[in-house]
Each structure stands twice: as structure tokens, then as C-alpha cells.
């Protein structure tokens, strides 16, 4: 089982972030990472489950966590300090599996990825540690079904 190996600066950062979360100095996603937002375009809510576009094909690959921009409105404020600390410790101790059997689930809109149903805390942690890659499952919704959030 291959695990992530952090550089010394990444290990120092993991330790520092762990203590900041533990001390209550980090309690929101944007305190952990600089960028964490909702997408400006979303799947048209008028589409029903009988649509030819749903579900979208998925890909599983290693992506750069710096390209994970945020999550959807229902998840934007999700932040569980215990989960973040657990992931930081696992990365720091070399216990985080590279080939996670249940990787974060994302949606790719344009060149940005947004966490959908699972993996918010793992994605935040990988992004905060500036990992070069993270195994993810992502879907790409067709352009013709995306609408601007304000237009829904």
C-alpha cells in the first residue's frame, strides 16, 4: 500500500495547521485554504432525473488539488475540525493512501473542480498541504445544461 510522502516543509505545515485547528484558530474552509467558493455555473435545476444528460460519465485520475476551487452551496460551510486534524495527522505520519478506494467526488466545470458529495475534508487538506496530486473521481457536465447560479 503506497502512501503519500510529504516534504519537510509540507510536514511542518501539516503540524502547524493541526495545532491551529486544535487551538480553534482555524474553523472555516477559507481559514485553511485561500480559495474555497461555490461555482458560478451549476446544473440547470429544471432538468429532471429522466434527462439524457444525467448521470454524467465519470473519470478517475490523479489531479492537482490546487485546481479544486470549492464545493457547492449546500456544502460551502462544512468544516469538521476533527476530520481535518485526522487527515493532517494521516498525511504527516505517512498513513494516507495514494490509491484511496473511495476518493473524493468532484465535478469539473471549466478548468475548476468542485467537491460534490464526498471528500470535502480530504480535498481541503490536500490543497492546504500543496500536494502535487490527489486521486479523485470527477464528472464533467455538458456545457448546454449549465446555468449561472443567479439565473436559476
Image (tube, rainbow, N blue to C red):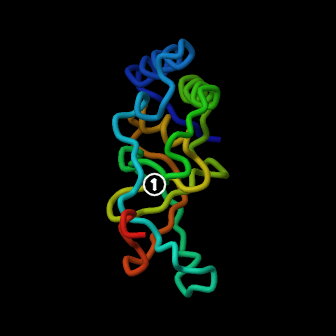
Q: Report x, y in % for residue 115.
A: 51, 52
Provide residue 103's location: percent of width, then percent of height. Answer: 60, 51
Q: Give the structural element (helix, strand or loop) at label 1.
A: strand
The residue at 55%/56% (across/down) is: 116
- Which residue occupies 51% across, 72% down? 45
Looking at the image, residue 76 lies above or below residue 107: above
Q: Is residue 118 above or below residue 125?
A: below
Farthest residue, direction front: 151
Residue underneath mark 1: 114
x 46%, y 73%: residue: 141
Q: Pinpoint residue 58: horizontal percent, then vertical percent.
A: 54, 69
Q: How many numbered badges does the structure rendering display?
A: 1
- The answer to whether 82 appears left or right of 115 in the picture is right
User: Is 106 placed left or right of 67 in the picture?
Assistant: right
10 Å crowding of disc 1: few (<14), some (14-19), many (20+): many
Front residue of this view, candidates 144 and 14:
144
Position in image of residue 39 (x %, y %): 39, 57
Instruction: Give the residue drawn at x 39%, y 63%.
Output: 149
Q: Quadrant of residue 54?
A: bottom right
Q: Which quadrant of the figure contains the N terminus?
A: top right
Q: Quadrant of residue 127?
A: top left
Please determine whether, in this image, residue 20 is positioned above or below residue 47: above
- Quadrant including the C terminus: bottom left
50 above or below 99? below
Q: Nearer the viewer, residue 95 or 35?
A: 35
Amino acid at each position: 500500500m503506497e502512501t503519500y510522502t510529504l516534504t519537510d516543509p509540507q510536514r511542518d505545515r501539516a503540524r502547524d495547521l493541526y495545532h491551529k485547528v486544535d487551538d480553534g484558530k482555524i474553523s472555516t474552509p477559507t481559514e485553511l485554504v485561500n480559495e474555497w467558493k461555490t461555482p458560478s455555473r451549476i446544473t440547470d435545476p429544471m432538468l429532471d432525473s429522466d434527462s439524457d444528460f444525467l448521470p454524467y460519465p465519470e473519470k478517475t485520475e490523479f489531479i492537482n488539488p490546487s485546481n479544486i476551487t470549492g464545493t457547492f452551496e449546500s456544502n460551502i460551510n462544512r468544516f469538521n475540525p476533527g476530520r481535518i486534524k485526522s487527515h493532517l495527522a494521516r498525511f504527516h505520519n505517512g498513513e494516507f493512501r495514494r490509491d484511496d478506494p473511495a476518493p473524493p467526488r468532484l465535478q469539473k466545470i471549466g478548468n475548476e473542480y468542485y467537491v460534490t458529495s464526498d471528500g470535502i475534508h480530504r480535498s481541503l487538506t490536500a490543497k492546504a498541504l500543496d500536494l502535487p496530486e490527489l486521486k479523485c473521481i470527477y464528472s464533467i457536465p455538458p456545457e448546454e445544461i449549465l446555468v449561472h447560479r443567479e439565473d436559476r
